[in-house]
Amino acid sequence: MDMKVAKKLGLKERYSLMTRDLAWDTTYQPMDKVFPQTTYEGIKIHDWDKWEDPFRLTMDAYWKYQSEKERKLYAILDGFNQNNGHLSVTDARYINVLKLFLGSTPPLELMAARGFSMMGRQMNGAGPRVACQMQAVDEYRHFQTQIHSISNYNKYYNGMDEFAHQQSRMWYLSDGKSFFDDAITAGPFEFMVAIGFAFEYVLTNILFVPFISGAAYNGDMAAMTVGFSAQSDEARHMTLGLECIKFMLEQDPDNLPIVQRWIDKWTWRGTRKLASVGMMMDYMLPKRIMSFKEAWEMYVEENGGALFKDLARYGITIPKCFSQTIEEKEHVSHQSWIGFYMKPQATPFHTWIPTPDEMDWLSEKYPNTFDKYYRPVLEFFDAQEKAGNRFDNKTAPMNCQVCVSTMKFNEPGDPMEMCFRESIYNGEKFHTCSDHCKEIFDNEPEKYSQTFISSHQVLQGNCEPDGVDVNAPDFEPGRHMLDYWKLDKRALGDFNGSEDQKNFAAWREQATKN
Amino acid sequence: MAIDLRTVSITPLRQTFGHLARRMGADKPASRYIEATMDLQPVENYHYRPTWEPQYDIFDTTRTAITMKDWYALKDPRQYYYGTWTLARGRMQEVAEGDFDLVDELGLAAAYPPAGKADALEVFLPLRHVAWASNLNKAYVSSYGYGIAISQAACYASMDQLGVAQYVTRLGIAFDDLDALANAKSAWLEGAEWQELRRYVEDLMVEKDWFEVLVAQDFALEGLLYPLIYERYNEKLNAAYSPVFSMLTRFQREWFGETSKWLDAVLKAAGADNPDNKEQLATWMRKWRDRAVVALKPVAALAFGGEAEAVMAELVQNLNARAAKAGVAL
């Protein structure tokens, strides 16, 4: 038979035909009008073809792998739900981890989906564009599977039912919201450093590994399966973030100071966001995996340190905030938990004082700080609670103008002193929680002066449910906060005595006894 | 830890999330599509304005002339969230894989009559660039569209078009001809037959109204192009030679049939919301339909020679009928 022997294509050559060879430089419309966003940040790209594809996955292979993963994942979720899997978790306190997670994570994965879609439209190299599009569609997967895995818990426990409504309204969720709003409103290269690199590469392990392992340790098959199933996607996302950094640095030496500033900024912003992961690990998981401090040492100091060593050949130095994060690793989880415990009327999850055993564990894991600074506070609160005088801070918090965390972190080197910084912009005073947040503010005051600080907005009458007349003579700002948040009273306050606690005990009794 | 749980029936405290109960008008179980879609995009209290377009909020209803009382009325009758979408595409790729394998195994491409092959590749292969443009334009809709109902469906359609561009590329490789791919790219860039079409998709790359991009790319252009090539032209080749091209473009045919259901539902819902929308849709549909006809005529002539006019006229009739079914009279 007269058959020409097919030329054997190498993987790289084949992938190139499947992606960049499809692209062309437009002529009916100028390229800078088709891709208008990639110059204004000052990043210089001379040759988009120098982009090294971080992974080579064509759509047919993508659909094959991903559909296999989805089939398995949903089979496990269905089984878990049908068999009342929620009753196999270690202790009903664990469910509060899911409440914290549902409010804070799927909404941010959604922003990642939208942000990477924008990158998948705006990057004018075909290689990065396809890689970003693939990450965008993966992020749809992540927020949807997370919601699907927690949906069944919502049927039985309080505090999860209004996460969609609360994502833009809850005071303590605005740090995460500001993080992603900040990234998505930045230019495309900064977005890639913020989300692709700082978040997905430097910090993702300390966010997801403790959550997934925590789920596994505490009998939550649903969340554990979702997490594990996402890991192979995350591996792709990490390589994309790293490739983007290398690409910018290899393209032009002028890019270095810009990239360095972004790495400094976003590593710090990410670190601030992780304070709540710390309190989850140290206080909220009934069966603990390791302390936040240990996780920080492993995932950030060791792995992150090695990464920055690797980037040193491009002139990148370790982020400025690194030494402060090392100092803070022994403090932030305690400060966060205590901060939330003090606001029992303002969160959709419960808080509690650790048991004596748990306090001993904390003493062992935090020999330098727990007994000295935090045990006394917790024991004092415990005694007050038992005496019927449960501490309840009803005042509106003061927030950092950049990270939007409540002001609760200490002055570097002095754990007994709260840290405050301020800047003046356009004659107005703005408060920040740290030197690093102040520096971020001072670099871009026009941006950060816009931050939506809910404790300020409440006083201006901007946080009221429909139907409240802010001009009425008897208007009292903040009186309707629970309605504004749609916060179910059953979800508030102490775990001890909560409906969750009683129901879980009764249901488990029913399921395990005759 | 494994706890032996007896199967017990527990009465749930609630059936679904609050935002879904309000939307459905009752506390009842919601489908996974509803859970994965409705009312999830932030709509308020944005922290900063985009540095790249400070005149807008991060998500902004005024990025299109279309207005909606409820943006989630633009829902997908296929009920695609990531899981169902990727399962559906997983099945389609399995079939496509089988088709490519079979063509390879039986040497069907090599056995294809040379004259027919040259003609067919001339028509099919530049379409990989059209699909690539479609991927980009759909990415625009998914980036700046309002609400997750439209953004996710556009995102999936955008990835689908990357898949189409890659399947067309594989078609070229299956016919064992990298030269044909290179020639097709030259034709796309310089060949007279393709320039109006290239102008059309490039003009869409700078169009700012995302809904107009959707109408122009998905309704007007693909509404004519897919039936023209993946249905009619395939039928012509099937009759004259063999069904190899039909086999190797099955994905595109199925995709168009399925995706049209989504698009028609979106157009119908937008038109039904208010009369201004309907008028706006009619204006865009006429404008881009007429331009698409100009863009596709030379391609139709390449494929159908003297019959091109008649084929195009019929396809325009069908497109008008689709618009009418969506409630828009053209």
Image (cartoon, coloured by chain):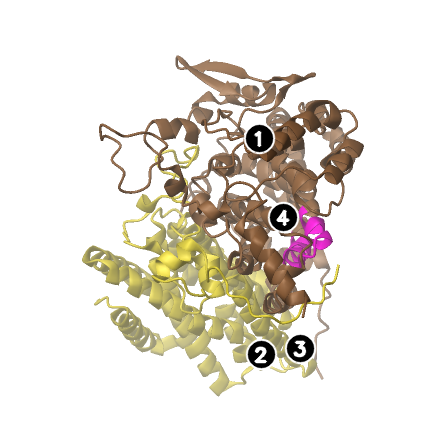
Chain colours: A brown, B yellow
**Marks 2 and 3 share the same chain:** yes
Q: Which residue is mark 4?
A: A93
Task: For the C terminus of chain A, give its image quadrant.
Answer: bottom right
Which residue bears the numbered disc 3? B101
> How far from the left and from the top, in percent, is residue B96?
59, 74
As shown in the figure, which amino acid type bears the numbered disc 2?
Answer: Pro
| SS category of the residue bearing label 2 | helix
Q: Which residues are magenta?
A: A211-233
**First in sequence: mark 2 or mark 3?**
3
Residue A427 drawn above or below residue B295: above
The residue carrying mark 1 is A339
Q: Quadrant of the N terminus of chain A?
A: bottom right
- Regarding residue A38, the answer to whether it shows in the image is no
Q: Residues within 10 Å of mark 4 (few under 14, many from 20)?
A: many
Query: At 43% across and 50% down in the image, what residue appears?
Result: B140
Q: In the rendered structure, does residue A229 fall within the stretch colored magenta?
A: yes
Mark 4 → mark 1, Cα distance in angstroms: 18 Å
Estimate the spatial distance between the alpha carbons at disc 4 and disc 3, rounded to whole Å. Answer: 54 Å
Give the amino acid type for the residue marked by disc 4 in the picture. Arg
- Please name which of the two marks, 2 or 3, marks the residue nearer to the observer: 3
For disc 3, the chain is B
Q: Secondary structure at mark 1?
A: helix
User: Mark 2 and mark 4 in contact (Cβ < 8 Å)?
Assistant: no
Q: Closest to the observer: A283 or B86?
A: A283
Can you identify the residue that label 2 sits on? B114
